[in-house]
Amino acid sequence: MPGARQDCSSWFKNIEHVTQDAEGQILWKGCVIEHFDSAHAQSTLSTEYVRELARRCVILEQQNVLPSVLTVICTWQEPSTL
């Protein structure tokens, strides 16, 4: 159903809009933003990192930029607060 909210039980690390596919790709609203091997995906260390990636995705969307590996990780620059 268009516009229906996805069941929160499917969120990766219980972080809204973040999912993981069978190949280990980490997705934000369906867009690949990272890749984890299975051991790292299950580690507690990855939770804060995924929260940071989600924070960046929100900022990028507010700037009308599509989140991707390139924009979330490779070329990420913290927005100026001035």
Image (cartoon, rainbow, N blue to C red):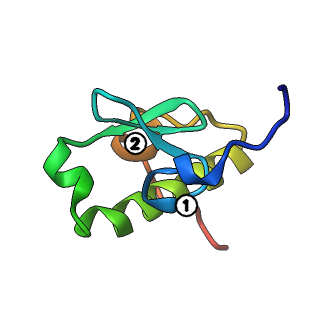
* Residue 22 found in image quarter: top left
- Give the amino acid at mark 2: Thr
Ranked by sequence position, the earlier of labels 1 and 2 is: 1
Task: Please tell me which residue lies in front, 51 or 2.
Answer: 2
- Image height of 78 relative to 68, above or below: below
Return the residue found at the far left. Answer: 39
Question: CB of mark 1 within 8 Å of CB of mark 2?
Answer: no
Coordinates of residue 52 in the picture (x, y in percent)? 44, 63
Coordinates of residue 68 in the picture (x, y in percent)? 47, 33
> Looking at the rendered structure, which numbered label has been put on residue 20?
none
Quadrant in which the C terminus appears: bottom right
- Give the amino acid at mark 1: Arg
Query: As drawn, is 28 to the left or to the right of 36?
Result: right
- Helix, strand or loop at disc 2? loop
Residue under pointer 1: 55
Residue under pointer 2: 75
CA distance separating discs 1 and 2: 15 Å
Task: Please tell me which residue lies in front, 36 or 21.
Answer: 21
Task: Please tell me which residue lies in front, 18 or 6.
Answer: 6
